[in-house]
Amino acid sequence: MSQATTPQKIYLKDYTPPAYAVKKVDLDICLYEQQAIVSSRLEMTRQAAGELVLLGRDLQLQQVSVNGEVLSSAQFRLDSESLTLIDAPDRAIVETKVIIKPQTNTTLEGLYQSGLDDEMMFVTQCEPEGFRKITFFPDRPDVLSEYTTRLEAPKTFKTLLANGNLVEAGEVGDDRHYTIWHDPTKKPSYLFAAVIANLQVLQDHYTTSEGRKVLLELYAVSQDIDKCHVAMQALKDSMKWDEDNYGRAYDLDRYMIVATSQFNMGAMENKGLNIFNTSCVLSSPETATDERSFNVKAVIAHEYFHNWTGNRITCRDWFQLCLKEGFTVFRDQSFSGDFRSKAVQRIEDVAILRSAQFAEDAGTLAHPVRPESFVEINNFYTATVYEKGAEIVRMLANLLGKEKFRQGTDEYFARYDGQAVTVEDFLSALSVADERVLAFMPWYRQPGTPVLSGGVQYEQDKVVVRLAQKTRHVPNYDAPVALPIPVDTAIFDSNTGQLLAEKMLLLTTDSAEFVFDGIQLSEGGHPVVSVLRNFSAPVRLEFDYSDEDLVRLVSFETEGFNRWQAMQTLVNRWLFGSFDNVDSIAGLLKTVTDELLDCDPMLAARLFDVPSQKELAMAYDSDYDPVAVKARRDEFIKLIACALADKTTTWYQALPIQAYEDTPLARGRRLLRNVLLDLRLLAGDAAAEQDVYYQYDNATCMSERLGAFTAIINHDLGKKSLYIANFYEKFANEDLVIDAWFNAQALSSRTSIDDIAALMQRQDYDWNTPNRVRTTLGALAAKPVQLWTQQGMALYLSAVERLDGSNPLLAARLLSALARWYTLGDDTKAMAQSNLEQLKQKVQSKNVLEFLDNMLTV
Ligand code: 0A1
Ligand code: ZN
């Protein structure tokens, strides 16, 4: 596309059903050294008015025929996006033959090569619009078909996989072979998958609640196959969990997962053949931190859960993306919460929501959970669609309670199985259990994070909680309306800490008062009201707690999330200057750490959280000064470290390295130990440096090793270069660990922009592997002080420009991290704007152009 063309917008209101249905698809992919030949046979029947249009991109059409007759060029129109058959009959067997070039496809969409030499493989990524890069097809999610796939390749690729069941395998001459797969379930084209590779397989079985014996297979290159056990266990746990919690069993005889090193996202739920980024499937104690290992389990669950929420019931159109993603994220978060402390799970999920989604909602890329228009659908795989989408489902689940929610989801599965549906359909099914569900529709339509404010009054035994909501008016959208906001509330006695009342309040208007009667307070006590427990709605809370009541909540709130939140609110108040008693925060940390050290070290570690620089930036709509924000944050951490200096070493010693175990307790101990190590170094503890080296040298797992390694780098310890070399050498063959090596260095505030640029010049900095690219650019985006300088932006945007040509999806995602540039102080803002405007002159992709257009409209 030339720069002058305005990218074309697509609107939800323009949806029309497809003109033709495709009953059956027969696909044949023959891979050769420089190209692949793809033949397809589609059984099409007319369903509605309109031409027979097949979408295709970067395909070299060799031949097209209809009902056995080869078409002449006068019988079809071909452009860069589509093939239209003129005067096509109502029933048509359409056959096409095309040439594609997977070997040079760097976009990681369609069929592409990942890896080199023995690790070379060919994989597909079809969601959302990649299938049209493999063959001509009505590539939209409401066209559901039955697929048969033949794959043919040289025998050097011994693994030939596609969706469904293997029905045939054989040889073609001496050097080539083939397999044929049949998928009996009807699916949209975005769930198609094929893999041509040379992989090892880890096998297991699972028998479903319906008695089906399912073969489970995890495929990876040979050096990684021993890192698939965590994922295999997670898969079995997920299968059982979905049966127990939603009554959903798996429906095919085979479930395959393939690990690939080059992948734009985390993983993909293709029917019966998931394709995973290695970072989301490989895990071993030696190579994956606890955080990553836990994420592996969550992503395995997420993709598995899609089998019902996404695959069997799919989206009518891409505007409905949150239908499958919001629900599936909610499901995977619930699954993860069942395997650890629920409070910690919620703290982590909310931390992601706040740092990624709230920022999106507050910036130039704000959009509703269900957008009403887009230029490039790939730009809408966002925190808003996923995370805020999950929050809406969570609100509904909480409102309905376990049984009614299950009644509603049972209705959803029964009513829409095998169909492509909308958000309205989802709510309509849930509403059989409770009609109040229908009032939540505006949450899907309205962008912007509501601000929930309020306070408390009381007189004798009557406590009144005032609540009010306000959502900013996002340009180009209707004026905001009041949303239904569930506010989980508790009342404690200020003296005794006793829990006096608990209730889920539902605010449905701009403001309201909620009365609690019969509250029996102790002599001289007052009610301490704790609102939005467990973060019961995705809002920004501005409740007028007194500082003293927040301190009380840290001590006696029984709900873990709000206990953590009370501490966060105090920290925020200190950072923004409205609370100056750092000793009181340190005192609280002392007491809670002593209390939790043995029973819940993970929560203890979390209580030391300080909002990230990016999160703090959210507080500014103008005049944001990254240097001042960082300085204040650093000052706080240093003060805490010094105030706790007499305790941190004792706690650290109480958590010695032990034989590796993968339990919540062991993971908590490892995390807390790393937090303490950092604080000790900050406080100048003389023994800490030796302890860091000791922890690194004697680590039993990657969490311990990387914790020490990061501390060595962040604190610029004497043996830093030695350890940088040692770490590299030890793990030179482990790409994901080398990613961590890049990332730890790039993230340190001591690593300059020049140093980051130098990392990016290295031979092993592979621009075709998104995981590697993100190690440095993700780090730079997390360091606003460096990012928002001429040099930082130049480095960052030159990477975006470079990727715009080779991998526009990745380029656009990286760019979106700069969406709040206009909040900077005047000079920096002008610098940022001119950099973004210059970039606009140099890029081509719809992905990057759509974001730039939106970002520059402030
Ligand atoms: N559906 C996947 C996410 C995904 C989206 C796009 C991709 O490539 C362009 C890949 C994966 C999920 O939610 O896990
Ligand atoms: Zn998903």
Image: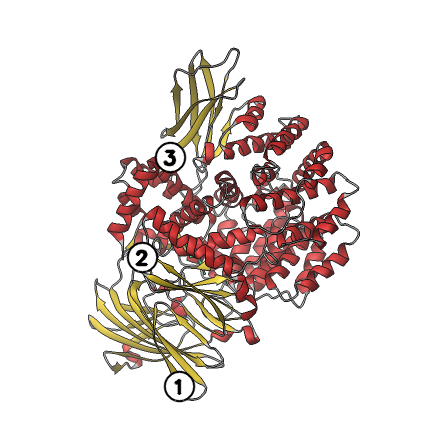
Q: Which residue is mark 2?
A: 312
Give x and y (percent) for residue 472: 45, 36
Q: Mark 2: which secondary structure?
A: loop
Q: Earlier in the sequence, mark 3 or mark 1?
A: 1
Task: Nearest to the eye among marks 3 and 2: give it.
Answer: 2
Compute the Cα span from label 3 to label 2: 31 Å
Q: Which residue is mark 3?
A: 483
Q: Secondary structure at mark 1?
A: strand
The answer to whether residue 35 is left or right of residue 438 is right
Image position, residue 533 (x, y; %): 46, 32
| Residue that appears at 48% across and 50% down | 854
Q: CA distance from mark 3 to mark 1?
A: 62 Å
| Label 1 – label 2 distance at C-alpha | 35 Å
Q: Quadrant of ligand 1?
A: bottom left
Give the percent coordinates (x, y) of residue 719. Answer: 78, 54
Q: Nearer the viewer, residue 381 or 59?
A: 381
Q: Is residue 637 above or below residue 260?
A: above
Residue behind mark 1: 172
**Label 3: element kind:** loop
